[in-house]
Amino acid sequence: MGLFSDLFSTKPAEEAAAAKAAGYATGKTDANAALDAGLAQANPLYKQAYGDFSSLAGKFGAGQDTYNDATGVNGADGVARAASIFKSLPGYSGGLTTGIDAVNRGAAARGDLGGGNTAADTIKFASDYDANKYGNFLSALAPNLSGATAATSGGAGVLGAQAGTATGVAGQKASYDWNAATGTGNANADAALAPYSASQNFWSALMGGANLLGKATGIGGWAPSTTLKLG
């Protein structure tokens, strides 16, 4: 019975198929878990980097808003806000006062402190002073434009990289799933074919046994050799 059990049993094929399917399932689970773990570690880093860029963009954005106010982009209200900031800057009032004092001293030396020329000189100085200072004010604000753009671009880059990583992980998991499904399907197909293989083994063994029996009995044109002895 041992021989026939070995030849005709489907159990070994079924066990092998089950082992293959289990191996594919384990490999898929382990691979997907590793990908999930890697993504879980990467996401906080992406979040931190994006947060840094967002914070930087907010800081530069405030300067950009003031620049827009100062250049009139945001209308009269914006200009008024910018003027208020401009005139509150350290050194503005002191420089204006010092300059006007110098104009008055010059007028006093000429004996024209209360004259029309002195008033005109004072107005001209104040106007030139404001124009020069305001130009410096705009120049100081201008870098906020490129800074805000760079910070926003950096944040967008982080989000793009995060999306790319997530897409890559999803693609790898899909590939592992497909391989596992294909391997499991092949293993199950092998198990399904096991009865046919067992039947083939049965008929091969049966025909092989019949051939041996025929040869032993002389059926089919073959007979055991005999030795004739004389005397």
Image: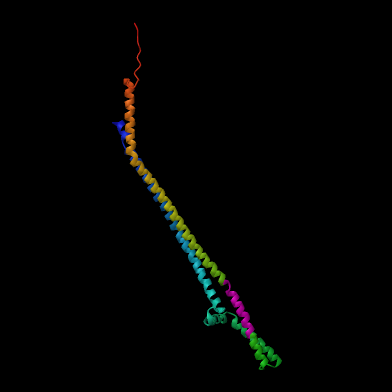
Residue in the image at 59% along x and 81% along y: 92
Furthest residue to the top?
A: 231
Relative to 11, does residue 30 appear above or below in the rendering?
below
**Residue 190's spot in the image, x, y percent?**
36, 41
Q: Quadrant of residue 183?
A: top left
- Near-viewer residue (225 or 48): 225
Residue bounds of the magenta highlight: 126-143
Relative to 50, does residue 130 appear above or below in the rendering?
below
**Magenta stretch: residue 110 in it?**
no
Q: How is the image coloured?
A: rainbow
Q: Quadrant of residue 85?
A: bottom right
**Residue 69's spot in the image, x, y percent?**
54, 78
| Quadrant of the snapshot with the C terminus | top left
One can see residue 129 in this view: yes
**Magenta segment main secondary structure:** helix
Residue in the image at 32% along x and 26% along y: 210
Q: Tell me if 116 is positioned left or right of 53 in this view.
A: right
- Near-viewer residue (160 or 119): 160
> How many labels sit on residues?
0
Residue in the image at 33% along x and 29% along y: 207
Furthest residue to the front?
A: 221
| Quadrant of the snapshot with the N terminus | top left
Furthest residue to the right?
A: 110
**Magenta stretch: residue 141 in it?**
yes
Q: Tell me if 108 is positioned left or right of 68 in this view.
A: right
- Near-viewer residue (31 or 197): 197
One can see residue 30 in this view: no
Relative to 136, does residue 107 appear above or below in the rendering?
below
**Residue 125's spot in the image, x, y percent?**
65, 85
**Residue 24's spot in the image, x, y percent?**
39, 46
